[in-house]
Amino acid sequence: MIFDSYEAYRAANFKPKVCILGSGPAGTTIARKLGAAGIPVVVLEAGSRDFSDESQDFYRGTTVGDFYFDLDITRLRYMGGSSNHWAGWCRVLDKQDFEPKAWAPDTGWPIRRADIEPYLPEVHDILELPDFRPDVPISDDIRWVQLIKSPAVRFAEKFADELDKSRNIAVVLNTYATELAGDGKRVTGAKLWSNGQDAGSFSADYFIVCTGGLENSRLLLWSNQRSNGGVVPNATALGRYWMEHPTFEGGNAILADYGEFEVDAVNEAFFSPTLAAMERLQIMNFGIRLIETPYAGVKHVIADLACTAPDMAEWVAYQLSQNLRCAAQLYVAWEQAPLASNQIELSKTDVDHAGVPRIELHWKKSELERRTLVEGLKLFGKTLIDKDLGRVRLMDWIANGEDYPTNEETAGHHHMGGTRMGTDVTKSVVDANCKVHGMDNLYVGGSSVFCTSGQANPTTTITALACRLGEHLSKVVSV
Amino acid sequence: MSFFKKMSRRTLVRAMIALPALPVFRKLPEIDAAQAGPSRADPNEIVEVNGWILKRSDLA
């Protein structure tokens, strides 16, 4: 069932056991799992069926530190959430991403990759993915990895019909849960805002917060403030350890045999470090994306190379004259070191139309990450030389140690952390089952539970974790 | 001191003019590969030039 207003939902007299906040990939996946298990569940979606400026305005906020996107641009507030502008790149976090790393504090998850692997067949169905091929080591240091460009499933489009027909799932649009109330053991209710006004309180046996990698922290911070700590009793880490995937053009490569890596339909190939290389160089994970350089760009490479390595420049020029692919742009995205200082705070001066403080995001890239970028590119360059595959050139700003440019991709629009998973209540918010520490009926879904970000786009892992949480809850919740 | 006293001024000037040319006629010893810097010994050495990560043998 899908209701366009809270009033219409109330008239239907539906009695849910579970309330999910947010209808993005995590919220929709968990709802479908619970619905399939016969558990009545309501999904409260703050936005409507389509994009609107009025709804997006609730997402405005400010950023302190490094340059970042406007917070009302980097996510979407309507049915299906940010899956509505997702590019479709898929890959699950690597096994090594779940392991603690001695050179990077506060890394390591309380679960292993093996804990989500049983859900991957389900994830492949949801995201319409073919099987991943195993990573291919091209040296002891570098793996040729696969990111699949999926059809970019829009969750609202794909599942609207199923949700509408479901007798166990009620999706309620235009209904914004502005705060949760709690007594330090349980969430006792949610305060709602609908059609531009206060819509009273709402209660259910269980609440699952799936409002996105920025909004989950905002809602819980505000709820906890209003409930005097009654919603997140151990709140030291709440809003902290927020992460992104910084993304920049890192340089160029000339390749002896461009077809070597059988680049996919979009002419892109991806490379990541081995755990041994990360450990030796004391760096984080990263992904180097090869994109074929257009004609004008190759001529620039030739001119740049001519003074330094003329024979090689001549070879590239010959390849170009034969219309052969031989050069690529290198885009680098890397894993951020989890830092407590990268955090979501509530604005002290600015609130949205419902009176909820807006986000003040504190975000800064660290020295460890700069080293990851530089050493990662050098490692890739050395590997191409060692294997006689090609040569790499670093962008001037990287080679010269200059500041990050502000006119490039900047980051992946991947919002991770803030309610991270863990066993130490001073450094995490939820446990291995995504249940808020100390609370009996409050869970969190989505990338805000990520302990570390790895280098892979998060949607595949979000969906796998949502399948896992849905299955867990279907055993916990009694009908 | 006694050496300079015995040389004529003309001889001394000729010697100083000839001095820079001496290495040209001198047979230089073979460079021991082990003692030589890697830049001379190893064409496979990885070098960074103008942002390019190259083998030394790639260079002009």
Image (spheres, rainbow, N blue to C red):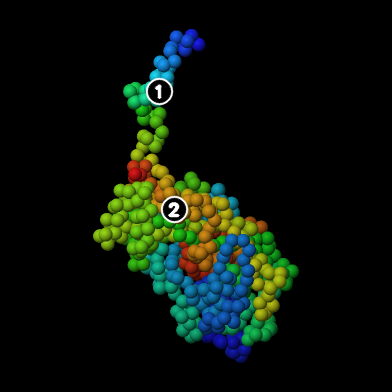
Name the amino acid, label 1. Ile
Give the x, y percent position of residue A345. 66, 66
| Residue A230 placement, left or right of A140 | right
Name the amino acid, label 2. Leu
**Residue A224's quadrant in the figure?**
bottom right
Marks 1/2: CA–CA distance? 49 Å
| Residue A304 placement, left or right of A19 | left
Secondary structure of the residue carrying numbered label 2 = strand
| Neighbourhood count class around disc 1 (C-alpha, 10 Å): few under 14, some 14–19, many 20 upward | few
Q: Residue furthest toward the front?
A: B10
From the image, tell me which residue sits under label 2.
Answer: A394
| Residue A224 placement, left or right of B11 | right
The answer to whether A222 is drawn above or below residue A369 in the figure is below
Give the x, y percent position of residue A4. 56, 87
Pick the quarter of the image with the C terminus of chain A. Answer: bottom right
Give the x, y percent position of residue A313. 32, 52
- The residue sitting at 45% across, 9% down in the picture is B6
- The foreground one among A283 and A120 is A283
- The residue sitting at 71% across, 69% down in the picture is A348
Residue A263 appears in view? yes
- The foreground one among A265 and A205 is A265
**Residue A203's quadrant in the figure?**
bottom right
| Residue A117 placement, left or right of A237 | left
- The residue sitting at 59% across, 80% down in the picture is A55
- The foreground one among A412 and A425 is A412
* Chain of the residue under the numbered disc 1 shown in the image: B
Give the x, y percent position of residue A207. 62, 74
Residue A100 appears in view? no
From the image, tell me which residue sits under label 1.
Answer: B17
Q: Are marks 1 and 2 on the same chain?
A: no
* Chain of the residue under the numbered disc 2 shown in the image: A
- The residue sitting at 46% across, 76% down in the picture is A154
